[in-house]
Amino acid sequence: MSPNLRNATLGLIFATAAIFMTSASAQTATDPLAGTWELNVRASKFGPASPPKSQTRTYEVVGQQEKMTGRGIDAQGKPTLVQFTLNRDGKDCPYEGAPGIDTISLTQPDTFTANYTLKKAGAVVLTGTRLISADGKVMTISGKVAGGTGQNTETLSVFDRH
């Protein structure tokens, strides 16, 4: 292969890679979920559970796939880590780090709304909705615990964009 043809081929490969990377990051940047969110503990409601001291969630979005990593400090002062990667197609995917949850499924009826279901061993534990404000600054995650016992079984986590 001649040096000119080799350089042209390498240039084409790098240009194609740059276009793909720009396309993926542009797609991520346009999704209002993508980025880092801080839990507003005061504005949130945790039902009968003790509230965490803090939580930061980072979402990465490429196409219909999202990855969430949540790090925080629980009510007893211990560090926490929860995470999942899923497609927004309603199929169960692994949820790691929460003892009472092992899968999550999610559908997204519009850009700012998602409906989710959390399960443990195939049984529904919590269902709810994630809503991002029109200005993209506040995310609320509301949920209802399955099989309520008459106690307050609704949760509301309010996150502010960081």
Image (tube, rainbow, N blue to C red):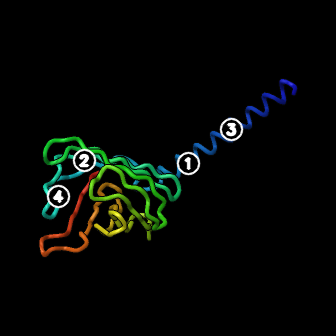
Badge 3 local density, few (<14 within 10 Å), some, or many (20+)? few
The residue beneath circle 1 is 24
Q: Estimate the spatial distance between the alpha carbons at disc 3 and disc 1, rounded to whole Å.
A: 14 Å
**Which residue corresponds to mark 3?**
15
At label 3, the amino acid type is Ala
Please, what secondary structure does the residue beneath circle 1 have?
helix
Q: Is residue 142 above or below residue 2?
A: below
Q: From the viewer's perspective, is 7 left or right of 72?
A: right
Q: Residue placed at 65% from the left, 40% from the top?
A: 17
- Looking at the rendered image, the disc whose residue lies closer to the viewer, 2 or 4, is 2
* In this rendering, position of residue 84 left or right of residue 27: left
Describe the element under mark 4 as helix, strand or loop. helix
Residue that lies at the very extreme toward the top in this rendered image: 3
**Given this view, does label 2 or label 3 mark the residue nearer the observer?**
2
Q: Are marks 4 and 3 in contact (CB under 8 Å)?
A: no
Looking at the image, tell me whether mark 2 or mark 4 is earlier in sequence order.
Answer: 4
